[in-house]
Image: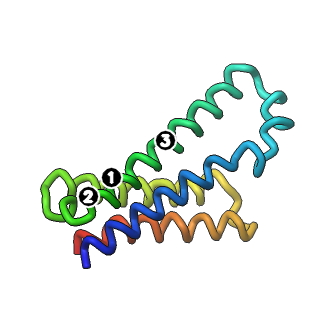
Amino acid sequence: MAAAFAIAAGAFDIGIGLFHLGFWRLFRWGEQLPRLSALNAAVMQALNVSLTLLAFILGGLLIAHAGELPASTLGRELLALMALFWLARGVQQAVFFELKRLPSVVFLVLCVLGAGLHLGPLV
């Protein structure tokens, strides 16, 4: 059961990575980013590319080592820290985004789901 949760958490992370790949189109960055300073536009894009890569790396590790991670101290710590990441991201969603719009609420729910999926292999 722990391995199934780890695989689900890995698939979730990869899905988030795929979502991040669509940011340029979804948020019309070609049109929107030029309104920022060159530095702020570069920071946004670099952070997005880095988060995308990290999501793919972690998702791949979780899927490839689904049986090992919940059984090792390092794996349990990684899973717990990823759950903490998603809980923190959920708090950021509530703080930085208006929860008056459905997409913001949906993403908050996804953050809680992500935390649960990463905690799942630990229980």
- Total residue callouts: 3
Circles 2 and 1: CB atoms closer than 8 Å: yes
Q: What residue sits 51% from the left and 60% below the top?
A: 90
Percent x, y for residue 93? Answer: 59, 57
Percent x, y for residue 31? Answer: 86, 36
Q: Which is nearer the N-term, disc 3 or disc 2? A: 3
Task: Give the SS element for disc 1.
Answer: helix
Q: Which mark is residue 61?
A: 1
Task: Give the SS element for disc 3.
Answer: helix
**For mark 2, what is the residue?**
65
Q: Residues within 10 Å of mark 3 (few under 14, many from 20)?
A: some
Circles 1 and 3: CB atoms closer than 8 Å: no
Is 12 displayed left or right of 2 in the figure? right
Dividing the picture into quarters, in which one does residue 101 lie?
A: bottom right
Task: Give the SS element for disc 2.
Answer: loop
**For mark 3, what is the residue?**
53
Q: Which is nearer the N-term, disc 1 or disc 3? A: 3
Tell which residue pokes out farthest to the bottom in this image.
Answer: 1
Percent x, y for residue 105? Answer: 65, 69
Label 2 vs label 1: CA separation?
A: 6 Å
Q: Which mark is residue 78?
A: none
Q: Nearer the viewer, mark 3 or mark 2?
A: 2
